[in-house]
Every structure is written in C-alpha cells, then in structure tokens.
Amino acid sequence: MNSISLSNLTKKFGDFSAVDSVSLDVESGELFGLLGPNGAGKTTIINMLTTLMAQTAGNAIVAGFNTRTDPDSVRRNIGVIFQEPSLDIGLTGEENLDFHAMMYGIGSVEREKRIAEVLSVVGLTDKADILVEKYSGGMKRRLEIARGLIHYPKVLFLDEPTLGLDAQTRRKIWEYIKYLNREYAMTIVLTTHYMEEADFLCDRVAVIDHGKIIASDTPDGLKKILEGDLVSLENTGDPGNFVSALKRDPWVREVHVENLTIFITINDGEKRIPKLLSMAQSHGLQITSVNLRKPSLEDVFIHLTGSNIREQDENRISSRHESMTRRMRR
C-alpha cells in the first residue's frame, strides 16, 4: 500500500519549471529520501505534498487524500519539520508542544500524555521546562521533531533535517529518525543534500536535479550503476592523452577528470593499479596520490549529473550573485 503517489506533479514559476512532471510512489512505512543539490526542486515537492503550495499540474495523493481537492485531510494526517526553525523561543519546550497539540484539537488529558511521550522519544524530558531560547541547535531540532509527532501523523516530512548541525548532533538526529520509522511504522520522507545521510537512513532514494527525478532505487541499487572499483589518481601535468588512452581500454568502465584528479571506474581495482601507474608514466604524468574505494552515492550523483553537489551549489550561488549584481547596476 502506498502512503504517497505522485503522477506528473509539476510546479512552474512563469516559464521556469521548478518541478517537472515528477511521478513516484512511496510505500507505507518506508523511509524515502529526495537527494539533490539546493535548487533541485526538493523543497518545492515537499511544499506541494504538505499543501503549502498548489501544483501547476499533475496529482498528489498523501495518506490517502488528494492534495488539491482535500487539503484539510492531508494536513490532519501529516507532520512537517521545516528546513527553517519555527519554534517560539519565548516558550518552554513543553509549552511549544502544548500549543501545537491544542491546534490539532487534542484534549488536555491526551495532550499531557502525548507531550510526555514525544519528549521521551527525542530525549528532552529533562529539558521540558527550559525556555527554547536556551536550547542548543540540536535540541531545537529534536523539539521540532517532537512537535511534528504530537498528533500521531501517518506521514512525516523532514526538509533538510540536519542542515547546519555538527557531525555528532547529526548522527543523533539520524538515530531518532530511524527509531521513529521502526517503532511507529511511520512513513518518513526527507530531503537532503548530504549523501551519507541518505545512504544511512533511506530504504529508497530518488535523485532529483533541475526538477526531474533522474534515478530512483535503494542506496545499494544506485551504487550498482557504477559497477567496479573507483580509483582516483592525483597528478601534475596535462592528463588529456592519458585519459584518451584509458577510454580506449575495454577494462575501463568510466573515466572523468576534476581539477587535478582523474577518477577511473574499473573492475579488480587493486590488480589494475600497477597498470594504471605504468600507463600514466608513459604519457608523461607524475602521479602524486592513489586512492581505491567502492562507489558511493556521491560518485553516482557525479555519474548522473556530471558534477558534484558542492559544485552545483556554488554555481547556483554564483549565478544568483551575478544576476543580483547586474540588476543593481541598472
């Protein structure tokens, strides 16, 4: 049974398609990830599924209800943790939860029970009476997760749930998300541009770029797109002739260059490294570093889109800055 079904979901802003005919199904109880760079369309999809934004075309069914024709029923059955903080820092943790529960019409006796439960789930029972303004960033994120659970949603949406958190706090949030999915059989949809986050958490992942889903599978299934080992060679010099020679060899599955590093996908990488070094030397290259590893989701993303997420983020920021500068000069 599907908790979410999308059919040709589209969102346009003028002539720009932020989400371009996306179709996918998320099964009940699944932990599903939307993976992609900033600006790829992840948050726009979440905004449509949570009824915060109307779609231009297509259909979306969430928790059994149509987002276009029955948005109130959708809202009653979902929880949302937004990318930007939305807590009232002038209230205590418990007061934030109590107010949110009242908004859902939960009676006082039941509210008290549920507040105690969700505070325990996220490990904030002993912080319930402290003003949120005194919470750390990780504590605030955990409280937002508790707030999203207070009405027992069928589907929980997490938009960049660990953005800006340190590595230790991020790992704790991952464990909470896993716990919720396992103990409550809750369908969870999260957006992220952290590759390791999607790999650790998700049953399935959809890679989205420029508003389109370009691949969808389990993390391990996506990695199988790049069968073989990944060898990276840092070098000094012009790798052009060496790369051309590699592309002619049948045992080389894929090769590309980023800055001074050559990335080569091959089978039996350990056995092939001496051959690679010999070929590099014959083409006048001095190899300064060699690394061998199995493909990651980052490698798959590079394979599918031609660049890594960090580069795409920087390019988008640079483009926006240049556009703003031009407008200011007019």
Image (tube, helix red, strand yellow):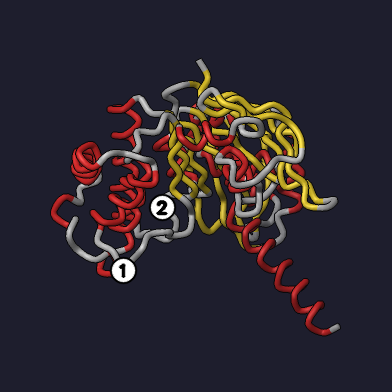
Q: Residues within 10 Å of mark 1 (few under 14, many from 20)?
A: few
Answer whether residue 92 is visible to the viewer in this image.
yes
For mark 2, give the secondary structure: loop
On screen, residue 302 versus residue 110, left or right, reads right
Against 223, residue 41 (above or below) is below
x and y percent of residue 10 in the render? Answer: 74, 38
x and y percent of residue 322 in the render? Answer: 75, 73
Quarter of the image that includes the C terminus: bottom right
Where is residue 265, by image quadrant?
A: top right
User: Mark 2 highlights which residue?
Assistant: 162
Against 84, residue 40 (above or below) is above
CA distance for labels 2 and 1: 23 Å
On screen, residue 164 versus residue 69, left or right, reads left
Residue at figure coordinates x 34%, y 46% from the top left: 102
User: Mark 1 highlights which residue?
Assistant: 90
x and y percent of residue 169 in the render? Answer: 30, 54
